[in-house]
Image: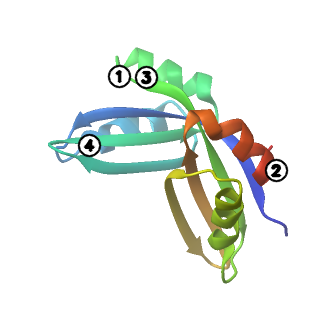
Amino acid sequence: MPDTIRQVDYFYLVVSNTTGAGAKMLQALKDAGVNLLAFSGFPAGRRAQLDFVPADAAAFKGVAKANRWKVVGPKRGFLIQGDDRVGAIADVVGKLAAGKIGITALDAVSIDGRYGALCWVAPRDFKKAARLLEAH
């Protein structure tokens, strides 16, 4: 199966870096039936940044509004998926480097012969990156 690279909307929040802060938000999304294509959380000083890539941006925004979350976005990124192989991410990074596009962040994981990655580039480079990656 060939790799798929698709353009996705993502949202982020900066929250207190306390035990359970992210769990509470994820539970609210679960209770509302909001499916996430990806989620990432990491510390930012005494706070934490939580990145959400929802399958349905409108549904995510509805939950965020109902819970009065201070959401930033939508912003744009790429969701990359495919059969795992040596150099899968190197191929993607190489295409962007050849196009002189720097990567803001990239997270990747492999499991059971498949891999997935999230890739962020500067907003000014997004359209060019989408063309280079043949993202849909």
Residue 51, horizontal then vertical, whole percent: 43, 41
Q: Earlier in the sequence, mark 4 or mark 3?
A: 4
Which amino acid, mark 2?
Glu
Question: How far is the residue under mark 4 from the one under mark 1?
Answer: 14 Å
Q: Nearer the viewer, mark 2 or mark 4?
A: 2
Q: Please count the marks in the image.
A: 4
- Judge the density around disc 1: few (<14), some (14-19), many (≥20) Cα neighbours within 10 Å: some
Residue 66, horizontal then vertical, whole percent: 41, 16
Residue at the spot 47% in from the left edge and 48% down from the top edge: 39
Residue named by callout 2: 134
Mark 1 element type: loop
Q: Are marks 3 and 1 in contact (CB under 8 Å)?
A: yes
Question: How far is the residue under mark 1 from the one under mark 2?
Answer: 34 Å
Residue named by callout 1: 69
Residue named by callout 4: 48
Which amino acid, mark 1?
Trp
Mark 3 element type: helix
